[in-house]
Image (cartoon, rainbow, N blue to C red):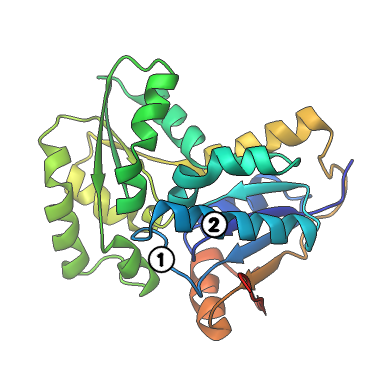
């Protein structure tokens, strides 16, 4: 058994969907969540910059917070930095890309999958490469959805404005005949109802959060790192930006576990 916490990071708040799944699936574990809101968003940034930020955060979580595992709960960071992080650190490093595309390939019936994400994630081609690596015999259609993250973080999930944006951005996928849509950004599950309204009930939505939590559980079991038999809780939340904003928005998205946050400084 290993009583050290699990480190989870994202550029902002979307990774809280993964933290929520981890808390639910692994109630005996403690989570340390770091939201890099001082440098948010990652989507439009250069991949080299995202890699540098990701390395700084992982180094902090491992060396300062003494985490036993790092979960990259940001699709943009995972698409840019996973290989480098796994080579640089000797704790398990898991991301959200593989669990998401694996789940999508498992549930599609007509072998036509759509993926939506930030510009950084989509432009990286990460999901298409993973589909090839998994020997998926169908087609993957990837579309960037700029603006979705901002609506989520304003708490605007169902308005006419966000519905109009979703209809415009998702129209190329509606024409592709997909039957499965992977929400390739951890913010997007909060817009699931609006996205489902646009895509139609014949298109199934896949979120990587639960699949990532199941992967984490498997790794903990396989490596003997599971905090089995202990009471969890005592989760900690860290932010590089405005703490009041982080707590207010984060509590709305995660739930009552996020009642306070600690400010930290990175990159100095």
> Does residue 228 lie above or below 133 as drawn?
below
Q: Is residue 31 left or right of residue 46?
A: right
Q: Are marks 2 and 1 in contact (CB under 8 Å)?
A: no
- In percent of width and height, residue 96 lies at 51, 42
- Label 2 or label 1, whichever lies nearer to me, is 2
Which residue occupies 33% across, 37% down? Answer: 125
Q: Which mark is residue 41?
A: 1
- Please rate how many residues cluster around mark 2, counting C-alpha atoms within 10 Å: few if below 14, some from 14 to 19, many from 20: some
Q: Residues within 10 Å of mark 1 (few under 14, many from 20)?
A: some
Q: Is residue 164 above or below residue 24?
A: below
In this view, the residue in front, 103 or 63, is 63
Question: Residue 34 appears in which quarter of the rendering?
Answer: bottom right
Q: Give the side of residue 231 with respect to residue 197, left or right.
A: right
- The residue tagged with tag 2: helix, strand or loop? helix
Which image quarter holds the C terminus?
A: bottom right
Circle 1 sits in a helix, a strand or a loop, which is it?
A: loop
In this rendering, the answer to whether 35 lies above or below 58 is: below
How many circles with numbers are drawn on the protein?
A: 2
Q: Position of residue 263 (x, y in %)?
A: 65, 79
Residue at 54% across / 37% down in the picture? 211
Q: Which residue is mark 2?
A: 52
Depth order, front residue of 140/81: 81
Q: Which residue occupies 36% across, 72% down?
A: 155
What is the distance, in whole Å, between disc 2 and disc 1 at their CAs?
14 Å
Of the image marks 2 and 1, the number of the one nearer the N terminus: 1
| Quadrant housing residue 113 | top left
Residue 90: x and y, percent? 76, 40
Note whether residue 122 is visible. yes
């Amino acid at each position: 058994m290993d009583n050290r916490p699990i480190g989870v990071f994202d550029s902002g708040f979307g990774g809280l969907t993964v933290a929520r799944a981890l808390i639910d699936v692994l109630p005996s574990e403690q989570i340390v969540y770091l939201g890099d809101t001082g440098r948010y968003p990652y989507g439009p940034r250069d991949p080299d910059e995202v890699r540098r930020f990701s390395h700084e955060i992982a180094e902090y979580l491992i060396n300062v917070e003494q985490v036993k595992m790092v979960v990259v709960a940001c699709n943009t960071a995972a698409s840019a930095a996973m290989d480098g992080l796994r080579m640089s650190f000797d704790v398990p490093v898991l991301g959200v890309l593989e669990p998401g595309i694996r789940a999508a390939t498992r549930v599609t019936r007509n072998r036509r999958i759509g993926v939506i994400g930030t510009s950084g994630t989509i432009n990286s081609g990460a999901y298409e490469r993973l589909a090839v690596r998994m020997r998926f015999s169908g087609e993957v259609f990837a579309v960037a959805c700029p603006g979705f993250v901002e609506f989520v973080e304003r708490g605007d999930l169902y308005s006419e404005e966000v519905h109009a944006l979703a209809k415009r951005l998702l129209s190329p996928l509606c024409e592709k005949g997909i039957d499965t849509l992977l929400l390739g950004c951890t913010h997007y599950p909060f817009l699931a109802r609006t996205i489902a309204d646009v895509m139609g009930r014949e298109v199934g939505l896949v979120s990587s959060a639960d699949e990532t939590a199941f992967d984490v559980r498997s790794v903990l079991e396989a490596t003997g790192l599971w905090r089995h038999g202990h009471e969890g809780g005592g989760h900690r939340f860290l932010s590089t930006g405005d703490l009041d904003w982080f707590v207010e928005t984060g509590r709305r998205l995660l739930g009552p576990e996020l009642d306070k946050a600690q400010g930290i400084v990175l990159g100095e």
